[in-house]
Amino acid sequence: MKKFSNKQWIKFSIATLLYALFCLWMQNAWLLLGIILLIDIFLTQYIPWGAWKRSTNPKIRNILEWVDDIVFALIAVYFINLFVFQNYQIPSSSLEKSLLVGDYLFVSKLSYGPRVPNTPISFPLVQNTLPILNTKSYLDWPEWGYKRVKGLGHVKRNDIVVFNFPAGDTVALKAQNPDYYTLIEEVGRDRIYMDKATFGDVIYRPVDKRENYVKRCIGMPGDTIEVRNNQVYIDGKPAENPKDMQFNYYIETDGSPITEEQFKRMNVSKEDRIMVSNGGLLSFLGFTPSEDGQYLPVYRLPLTQKAHAIAEKLPNVKKVIIEPDALGGPTYPAGYDTGWTRDNFGPLWIPKKGATIPLTKHNLALYSRCIKNYEGNTLEEKDGKVYINGKPETSYTFKYDYYFMMGDNRHNSADSRSWGFVPEDHIVGKPILIWLSLDKDHSLFDGGIRWNRLFRWVHPD
């Protein structure tokens, strides 16, 4: 019988203990079969894992060393990315000024508990599409159901949360903004499928391969949320507003432009400085032209409460008005006329796990997407009755908790007011640290790095 050295036993014992703890965390006894592999790697070595090391050709040995290191690194990154944290870049201004475009974040998977991947065979560090090759970065099979292992806590109100885009289950590849369901309302399903030059192929994506979004959790499961004149109410009570919440304002000057120094005082980026020249829009907003039909300069700017106060005191500013909700675009649910707008939305009850609702026409409009797309049921209306999974039903009990997400940049955020609830199985993690922040308004060596934001903790306020 082959004898094993003390060193082999020690390595095997440590690896087996760590792996057993991992299996316990995953709550999956089948994973313990992997110990058989550890026995061979550290003890019996029936499989020649390191056979390449015995090659007499130094070039081959050098190449295989590189391959061995790269494979090990990819596997390590894959597991860290799945279960510990991942890198995320802020792509849009929806959370300004809390998080800025160009912020690079560490997103903790441990904060809410990491999910077991729906698509376990995928390329690490790529969400859904391989660059250059422009092909899927994952295999459709196997596809596992939702399971989340124990984490350090749960989603709390006002947390900033990274999640998979719920309406990203179906995607027109060449027209991903607005989402597929809004596109159907705007142009019709037939045109989307017929006009591939404009919309491209229409594909389905599993939950963990839908695009990552980051917003603030405003509404919790079981809450009734409402927005009245831009103020959020939870169960009828005003919600606490983020410190740097922004709205769009139209600012008329006396004829002179807003200076670079004034823009900096209001902390408005170059991308957000929009001059309005549409006479019809200006007339709708209440601005008055001169006798020759010309309007004074009008800017559309997102401003915090502090910046708004500065704007009103600028010597060259005549008038400041908030953007009306008529310019806010369509709201959830798509295709159903609620009369809600971006700034006056709801009241809307947020589904809670174990809660039951009657299946009325109104509730079906609000919650049919939860029942079908997120909880995996079939749903149809026939002869005045509602059938779920082929059986007539008068009520429905939810399997998941849901959340209502909004951006702090309230007039420049496509969020739950546009596309609805975020199911618990779409929650990815919690941003905890800004490790890099780049300002595209400046060159790299002239203010392009926001040094004051480097290695700064992400706070919910």
Image (cartoon, rainbow, N blue to C red):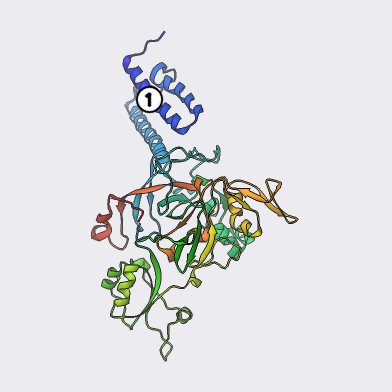
The quarter holding residue 274 reads bottom left
**Local secondary structure at mark 1:** helix
Which quadrant is the C terminus positioned in?
A: bottom left
Where is residue 317, by image quadrant?
A: bottom left
Nearest the camera: 42 or 249?
249
Position in image of residue 397 (x %, y %):
60, 47
Tell which of 454 and 183 is nearer to you: 454
Q: Residues within 10 Å of mark 1 (few under 14, many from 20)?
A: some
Q: In the rendered view, would you say 318 is above or below 210?
A: below
**Residue at point 40% right, 22% down?**
41
Question: Which residue corresponds to the image point at 55% horizontal and 38% vertical from the top-left?
Answer: 141
Question: Residue 151 placed where, x, y %?
Answer: 42, 39
Residue under label 1: 15
Q: Quadrant of the N terminus?
A: top left
**Residue occupying the far bottom of the picture:** 291
Check the image and report above or below for 61 versus 136. above
Question: Taking the image as drawn, is residue 177 in sight?
Answer: no
Identity, as a three-letter code, of the amino acid under mark 1:
Ala
- Residue farthest toward the right in the current orientation of the protein: 383
Res. 183 in view: yes
Residue 309 in percent (x, y) is at 32, 72
For the residue pair 159 and 135, the one nearer the viewer reads as 159
Residue depicted at x 65% and y 54%? 359
Image vertical order of residue 391 relative to residue 26, above or below: below
Please give left or right for residue 144 compared with residue 311 in the image: right
User: Picture coordinates of residue 329 (x, y %)?
Assistant: 51, 67
